[in-house]
Amino acid sequence: MTTVNYAPHTTQAVAARATGLSKVYGQGETQVVALDNVSVDFGQGRFTAIMGPSGSGKSTLMHCVAGLDTFSSGSVRIGDTELGSLKDKQLTQLRRDKIGFIFQAFNLLPTLTALENITLPMDIAGRKPDRQWLDTVIEMVGLSGRLSHRPTQLSGGQQQRVAVARALASRPEIIFGDEPTGNLDSRSGAEVLGFLRNSVRELGQTVVMVTHDPVAASYADRVIFLADGRIVDEVLSPTADAVLDRMKAFDAKGRTS
Amino acid sequence: MFRTALRNVLAHKARLLMTVLAVVLGVAFVSGTLVFTDTLSKALSSQSAKGYEGVAVSVTSYGPTRGENGQKEGEAGLSQQTLDKVKALGGVDSVSGRVSGFAGVGDEKGELIGSGWSNKGSNYAPVKDGKDPRYAFTEGTGPVKADQIALDKATAGTGRYKVGDKVRVATNGPVKEYTLSGVFTTEDGAVSAGGSLVLFDTAVAQELYLKPGFYQELSVAAKAGTSPDQLLGEIKPLLDAEHTKAQTGAALAAEQAKDVERGMSNMNQMLLAFAGIALFVGIFLIYNTFTMLVTQRTKELALLRAVGANRGQVMRSVLTEALVVGVFSAVVGLAAGTGLAVAMRSAIEAFGAKLPAGDLVIAPATVVAAVVIGVLVTTLAALLPAWRTGRIAPVAAMGSAHLPATAKSLAVRNVLGSLTSLSGIGLVLLGVNQGGDTGRLILAAGAFFMLVGLIVVLPLLSKPVIGVVRPALQKLFGIPGKLAAQNAVRNPRRTAVTAASLAIGLTLVTTLSVLGITLGQAIDRMSTDKLKADYKVSMAAEGMSLDKSVVDALAKAPGIKAVSPQADGYFKVGESYRSASGVNPAAIGQMLNIETLGGSLDSLAKGEVAVAESTAKKQNLSVGSTLQVQYDDGEKGALKVGAVYKDLEGLLSPYVLDNKILGAHTEDQYIREVYVNTAGGASKAAQQRVVDALGKNPAMKVATQQDVRNEMGGMINTMLNIMYGLLGMALIISVLGVVNTLAMSVFERTREIGMLRAIGLDRGRVKNMIRLEAVVISLFGAVLGVAIGVFLAWAVGTTIAKGIPNYALVLPWERIGIFLLLAGVVGVLAAMWPARSAARLNMLTAIKTE
């Protein structure tokens, strides 16, 4: 089988690129291949969703590209930086300066106010936040009235909006979301996804999101499908139905093969 | 349920580690103390029993001693006639008379071998076969001529003396040179304790220590077939019953064993008190651990309740867990304690003291005490957390897993705590106001309430206090500093409990330090400000009297300007005995800083008496009035009061007069020190002249003003160091408490730390964050402890200030600074392991933790 290179279908610049990426756990008999020679580009200013059944390697792919996890072979680039050669300290700095994160379980610091949580990555870096940009982001996610609240005083949706604002506030080159709507009700989930899409459309942000929800995936510009550690398909400008159909097709294939 | 508890203990091994360590240390302290003192007291008793082997009856005479009012009591010694009468009894095999006292041996450089209080001299008393059964000679023979002595083996070894060598021996008089006739070994207690023993010919020893022809003690050996009790009955009628005591050797050995035990029990009690403090501090740590374990298991425990376990069962399961931990730790602690006892012995011997050999004694009582204490402390600390589990509603099983216990209202607790601590402070102040023993009792009660109250209210205090340092931390360390300060107050109860355990140790350390140093300086001022003499000559053995000849020898020596003895005497004023100081009237004014309030010290030279202010007031005396006295020898006299001086307690008796008068009426005068002024003032050469004038006497000490000061400071410092050492265990346990708290915090905040790592906080700064949290908690406890300690030291100091002239509270800022610095270091050290595990967290698993 030949490896398909899922390059973006536009001529736009690339924000992150994985080439021949493999991740193998264990050795010999117990060896598990989480990622099998994956090559993929994430275009700048695009909203990409990664989908696949559990155990397909979708989270592992994101973790490797985001510099959270190490890989066995291949290469990962964020902008011009090759991740494979970086030490922990440099990787940490890269995540701090170039990457934004949104996690499934909000992951805010309960001791900090909403505003302090939003500016945390910049505080860690010792940078002054860009006031105007910060206002824009806060306004977009609709948190203006709640900046002095602590996470425990906010609803789940509001907490995730804080997380979105935190990811956006430092103007990272790329934002990674790990099931960002997994813990939210559908209305709050839709809001958060709306913000992410707006940030791509209006602010030119690059977003990569792992999800198992076809509706969430439909907010993206492009969906790539993983199975058994390999990219098996992609859908451009997806609708929820189109994604669902594609998934059903995999399931059927899985049962017949 | 027991199996559930056991499984829980095994499942939480790592989290129980610090708890186990704390209990092990506390129990080790207790059992180590018990094993050590039991072993030592058995060894000492069996040794003293050995000393009385072969002694059927022992007869001792009482001195002449001073009664309550200073009157002379008893006749000195047992005469040769008494000895002969005893010897003539039918059942007596042999009698040896003993007479002993201080004897110092000089080494090659002329310096004293041994430490002053352990230098003994005695007579060599050969019996029928020409040998003294107490001593076994390894070289030579016993001393039988006036110029011969024998030495114990260790002392002869230290001085490198061989039979036939000349040895300089000093008693309280001039040094004399003797010829070494032999070297011996003995079971004598003084020698086994590492002291030196010089044997003289009996006549020489009698001359030196008592009077010719008299003994202090008779050791009687019985003929075969005569029982000691029978012999005792025969001997008793021959004695002056009032001033002698006759006992069988067995009874005497038993009595000494009891003395040993009594002496040991004092040491025991002190050590156990400090062990108690360590265990008390341990309770805080254990409490924290079980609170956390229970909180984390809320869901699990609720599930047990939901499936039908009742309240009691759930509570018992937690207590059983504590029981298992307690028993395990107690057993390990007992083993560690035994090791500690062995180590303690080697440590003491490393300092030069010798302890008698003996088997290690692990009494059944020690084993019981160790287990009971270990179990009791652990279950007691787990009681409150266990009780809380009883209140977990079954429905909690369905709720969220993490239930932070912090949100609960602390209002009742705060009000109670504030009231208790305020009333405690009130009591302390009342005690200070009251003064005296009652005042101190009230103060102690107040201090207890204040501490308890503060511990209760500490969670409330933690937020504002730590809040104060947050901006500084943020400025200095950035985000890690800010987060550390916030994290430190996230679980105020736990932080408070951790800080409190440190605060207890530091309160004691600070109180003792401030008081010790304050008292030290007060005594220092008292003795040194008043002392003007260049040198103070005294016996190296504390409390021994100098011989009269010393004064004359010094007065005649070249380069010495003035000499005054400081000699004690007694006379009767009215019906009661009063102590007086005999001095050299021409010199005493140059030696001591005596402030006269009326008259002049010159009057002393005219045979008049100077009276201390307080006594003059009480006795209604003033300059010019006459004092009717009756001297020790019965003669009466009238002394004119020539001066009234400001009290110099500890230096001068309330009556001061020319020692020519006092000494003439007093037999065997006690001369505690002699003051010397040299021509041209104190210098190395001048000091050497004084030493030479004393005949290079190894048993005497020539102290400069600085020496006197150092001696005082040294004593206080030694005492403080011992206290620090004993409180060390409590401090170590509170450090474990800090480790424990941080390990828990890191464990609970796994997800947060993972997130911080993901969004860009590097490992170094994660470590810093944990370290700073530890430092903040430690310093919080330390500052609190120091503050309470200073307050209590002030309070206690004020109640005793009246008895001490020139009292002024001294705050040893340097020391306090060191305490705080150490607390900071403790924080960093305590954070080492938790910080490392935080920095090494796997981000991905951390983020996923539900």
Image (spheres, coloured by chain):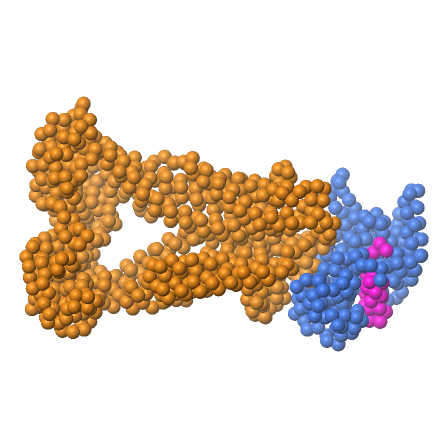
Chain colours: A blue, B orange
Splitting the image into 4 quarters, where does residue A117 fall?
bottom right
Splitting the image into 4 quarters, where does residue A211 fall?
bottom right
Does residue B656 appear left or right of residue B846 in this picture? left
Rendering coords of residue A224 (x, y %)? 87, 56
Rendering coords of residue B119 (x, y %)? 21, 46
Q: Is residue A189 magenta?
A: yes
Q: Is residue A205 magenta?
A: yes
Rendering coords of residue B729 (x, y %)? 45, 50
Is residue B309 depicted above or below B278 in this figure? Answer: above
Q: Read off the magenta span.
A: A188-213
Question: Residue at left 23%, top 63%?
Answer: B649
Splitting the image into 4 quarters, where does residue B358 fall?
top left
Does residue B94 appear left or right of residue B350 in this picture? left
Question: Residue at left 45%, top 57%?
Answer: B448
The N terminus of chain B - image quarter: top right
Rendering coords of residue B562 (x, y %)? 13, 66
| Residue A249 seen by the camera | yes
Question: Residue at left 14%, top 71%?
Answer: B622
Q: Residue furthest bottom?
A: A132
| Residue B139 seen by the camera | no
Is residue A101 depicted above or below A132 in this figure? Answer: above
Question: Residue at left 42%, top 63%?
Answer: B428
Give the mark count. Answer: 0
Does residue B467 appear left or right of residue B695 in this picture? right
Residue toward you, B364 or B584: B364
